[in-house]
Image (tube, rainbow, N blue to C red):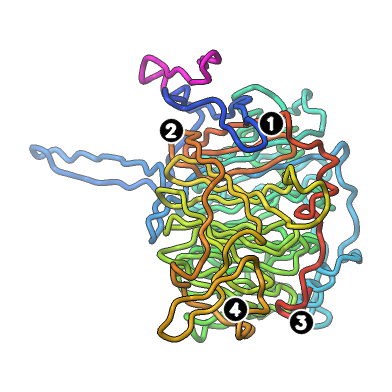
Amino acid sequence: MMNTSNGMISGPSSSSASAANPQSPGIKTYFKTPEGKYKLHYEKTHPSGLLHYTHGKTVTQVLCKNIKCTFHFYVLKVVSENGFVKFWCQVTLAHLKDKPAPSTPTGTSSSSTASSGFRSATARLLGGGNGNRALSFVGGNGGAKNVGASSRIGASFAASSSNTSATNTNFDGKGTYLVFNVGDAIFISDLNSQDKDPVKSIHISNSNPMCHAFHPDAKDGHDLLIGLNSGDVYTVSLRQQLQDVGKKLVSAQHYNKDGSVNNSRCTSIAWVPGGDGSFVAAHADGNLYVYEKNKEGATDSSFSAIRDPTQFSVDKAKYSKSNPVARWHIGQGAINSIAFSNDGAYLATVGRDGYLRIFDFSTQKLVCGVKSYYGALLCCAWSMDGKYLLTGGEDDLVQVWSMEDRKVVAWGEGHNSWVSGVAFDSYWSSPNSEGSGENVMYRFGSVGQDTQLLLWDLEMDEIVVPLRRPPGGSPTYSTGSQSAHWDNIVPMGTLQPAPCMRDVPKLSPVVAHRVHTEPLSGLIFTQESLITACREGHLKIWTRPDTQPSSSSEATNPTTSKPSLTSKVGGSS
């Protein structure tokens, strides 16, 4: 229960109540920012009784007085090579429009530059007459394709048949939803409802969902991507999942079936902006695959052997009808997260080796990158205008990378443990900006395993930027991000070493607030609220201050515009 008189949360009196209510004493139901007070509006969670932690099970046998006993240990969370818990809850915001998006023929032209660039890249990979053919998605007549279950742990699962499943008559076909994974289940909650429990739960047999992504303008209705720890990838219609009352995926299209192309864990997945249904899936072995949704997932997909595991390389599939169509070998070690710039021109990856890498997606070339100060990088996020990129990881720092300067321009210090989630607030504008476009300030947030939410303000004209370090001397400084002062621009495709601590300006958070009792795994900004999630699958929705500008301010906020990236980086925008 919440004690609203003092803004504190009263914890339950028993351990069983604690399991039902993740709150504990000492966590405030609000936090203050320069523009006003954020208040805890409501929470989302999952019924603990619905979880089935049966994957990753190990069996140990011991002898006790000549009696052989078998003990089953169930793995609730899987720890990767770098110690980062990969079964932590991830959250995706999904907005369903009033009506399903109309289906269009495969290969419909698009005016998007990024889309054109992607099609050119695909053409180079596949060559002319690639045998591309549209999928006949099962379920158009009410039936669903049944996928045979395998006896192998971490294999594919069977999709339920929609012609034998009842329909949810309460679902009106629209709304905004939160999709999140815990254990072997995916939960879907209505963002605009104060009901704590999800409206839908989907259970995965013999595997665990690891990541997901939503495409609001999917042309064939298959708008939700799901990546599993077995390496398998599915596309489904979120609307169909909500309409069906069963607890299995319906009308799912299957890729990398049974790990036929790559059986390592799918760590991150993303739609290609403007890519006509194309998507990319990153894996724990350092490889990333480019898929075309409108091509059938062939079982004969194969690629040439990787020549140098330490170097970036791109290989096309050996067969024109294969899907995935290309493999990007990023490097050694797991890819922990990927993110596209808003226009789809650039793809960022962060991984176990501690490197941020930025690629020109259409030309498939490495543009730039940098090493973390220490350890692996775990998360990344772009600003809406594509000028800045955030990363977080095991060095407890929030790193700000400038695409214009091709360097780290600031480090945020404030977390006491690994940074597990970062995001720009594209709906926020400085109270003093008044839409002038001058001295642009960015607001971004970060969450970490220290259970804290930190909010930061970045104004490049006010932070002190080291310019150069003369041999044997101290660095000189200037205010603002003035790349012209640097002696040399870093050459194209260079992976830079970690900068010296004294050479990078430091940011202090404007807010540091403990929002959960468990380590945090992600955050999302919406126009009305801020959403935080902890690793156990408990979500909190914090409403913005009353003084926050209305939605009309988004049009005047320079950080929410979508201009093409400057030609200074990679020569392509």
User: Could you tell whether 251 is left or right of 418 in the image?
Assistant: right
Which numbered circle lies on residue 517?
A: 2
Neighbor class of circle 3 (other Cα within 10 Å; few <14, some 14-19, many 20+) is few
Label 4 amino acid?
Answer: Phe
Q: Amino acid at mark 1?
A: Pro
Separation (CA) of disc 2 from disc 1:
24 Å
Residue that badge 4 annotates: 303
Cα–Cα span, label 1 and label 4: 53 Å
Report which residue position mark 1 lands on. 545
* Spatial CA span between label 4 and label 3: 16 Å
Classed neighbour count for the residue bearing mark 1: other residues with Cα under 10 Å, few (<14), some (14–19), many (≥20)? some
On residue 250, the disc is none
Q: Are marks 2 and 1 in contact (CB under 8 Å)?
A: no
The answer to which of 554 and 130 lies nearer the viewer is 554
Residues at badges 4 and 3 in contact (C-beta under 8 Å)? no
Where is 42 relative to 525, above or below? above
Which residue is pictured at 49% across the width and 20% down the height? 8
170 with respect to 402 (left or right): right
Query: Which residue lies under the disc numbered 3?
Result: 124
Sort mark 2 into few (<14), some (14-19) or many (20+) by Cα contacts within 10 Å: some
Residue in front for this viewpoint, 336 or 200: 336
**Inter-mark Cα distance, 3 to 1:** 50 Å
- Mark 4 or 2: in front is 2
Q: Does residue 12 belong to the magenta stretch?
A: yes
Q: Residue at x 58, y 57 (%)?
A: 268
Q: Nearer the viewer, mark 3 or mark 2?
A: 2
